[in-house]
Amino acid sequence: MRIGLILTEALGGLRRNISMVISVVLVTFVSLTFVGAAILMQAQIGTMRGYWTERAQVAVYMCSDISEQDTCVDGGASEEQVNAVRAQLEGEALAPLISEVSFDSKEDTYAKLVEQLGEDQASVITPEQAFEVFFVTMKDPGQSQVISEAFNGVAGVEQVQDQLQYLEPLFSALTVATYIAVGIATLMLIAAILLIGTTIRLSAYARRKEIGIMRLVGASNRFIQTPFVLEGVFAAFLGSALASAAVVAGVHFGVDGYLRGRVPFITTWVTMQDAVVVVPVLIGIGVVLAALSAGFAIRRWLRT
């Protein structure tokens, strides 16, 4: 009977303040959608970073006939210089740090160039002018700098390129985008908290006579406060549920249905399982913040 009365009061309050309730639902929905998007973006960054870090290589480009570096004064790298680099990679100092080494001859490099650019554009150079390249995969990608230090400035080596250097700006840009999403979500959550508090105070003011009567007949503050707290929780729960649905739909239609088939160079995407994990987080955030905001607002109003 007591629980039924409390729920009846809460639902009655929602009906009386329907416009404010809709506002709370919409603000909560938008803010928590940003929160969910930020969580999934950070998960995507972590997945991509792990995938590409494991596969990133350090490329040691030997001098070609068209090289102009100071280490290439004799033109293309000689066979002795190539063998010296190979021996150093297989030596006692570097071999324990290396997982795999592959070598592309001039013909291999030219064939890849033709495959990527087409024969017309690749014809600006001849196979003899192409680079010989060592591709080094490190056991610990964080130690790739060792290869750069070992071969930069060595005769016959034109340059050393660490592929991670090209990926870090992408990861940094995505991280900044995540921070922006979190910032927007934080502002929207603050707006939702304030809006919930205002809604509860307006609802309490509209029912001030009822509250006065309940106090006269000995109702406890907890009994009086509970319907108002439930009003805020119900509205926030609805907004959280909508945000959860938006996040799941975004992964299903946006990632699985669109991006996965149109961005082939990224093979690791967030999955529906990741989206499902985010759902209880969003609902928990919405319900807890609403309960705290509504509880604080009604307690403060009852003291006045």
Image (cartoon, rainbow, N blue to C red):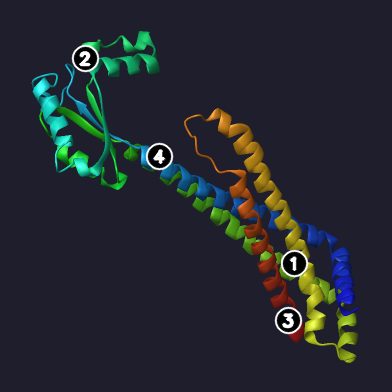
Secondary element type, mark 3: helix
Q: Which residue is mark 4?
A: 52
Tell me the mark number nearer the camera, choosing from 1 and 4: 4
What's under tag 1, amino acid-wise? Val
Q: x%, y% of residue 58? A: 27, 35
Residue drawn at point x = 71 percent, y = 49 percent: 245
Residue name at image x 72 percent, y 76 percent: 295
Between marks 2 and 3 in the image, the one whose residue lies nearer the viewer: 2
Indicate whether 232 appears above or below 28.
Answer: below
Name the amino acid, label 4: Trp
Q: Report the front residue among 147 and 10.
A: 147
Type of amino acid under label 3:
Arg
Please tell me the numbered disc located at residue 61: none
- What residue did someone put label 3 on? 299
If you read the primary sequence from the N terminus, does the residue marked by circle 1 or circle 2 appear first?
2
Q: Earlier in the sequence, mark 3 or mark 1?
A: 1
Residue 47 point in image, percent of width and height: 47, 45
Using a 10 Å C-alpha cutoff, classify the residue at mark 1 as few (fewer than 14 neighbours), some (14 to 19) or many (20 or more).
Answer: many
Q: Earlier in the sequence, mark 2 or mark 4?
A: 4
Quadrant for the N terminus in the image = bottom right
Q: Going 50% across and 29% down the picture, which residue do you hit?
A: 264
Q: Which residue is mark 2?
A: 129
List the residue tagged with mark 1.
233
Mark 2 or mark 4, which is nearer to you?
A: 4
Specify which label sits upstream in the sequence, 1 or 4.
4
Q: Tell me the crowding category of disc 4: few under 14, some 14 to 19, or many 20 or more residues within 10 angstroms, Cα based.
A: some
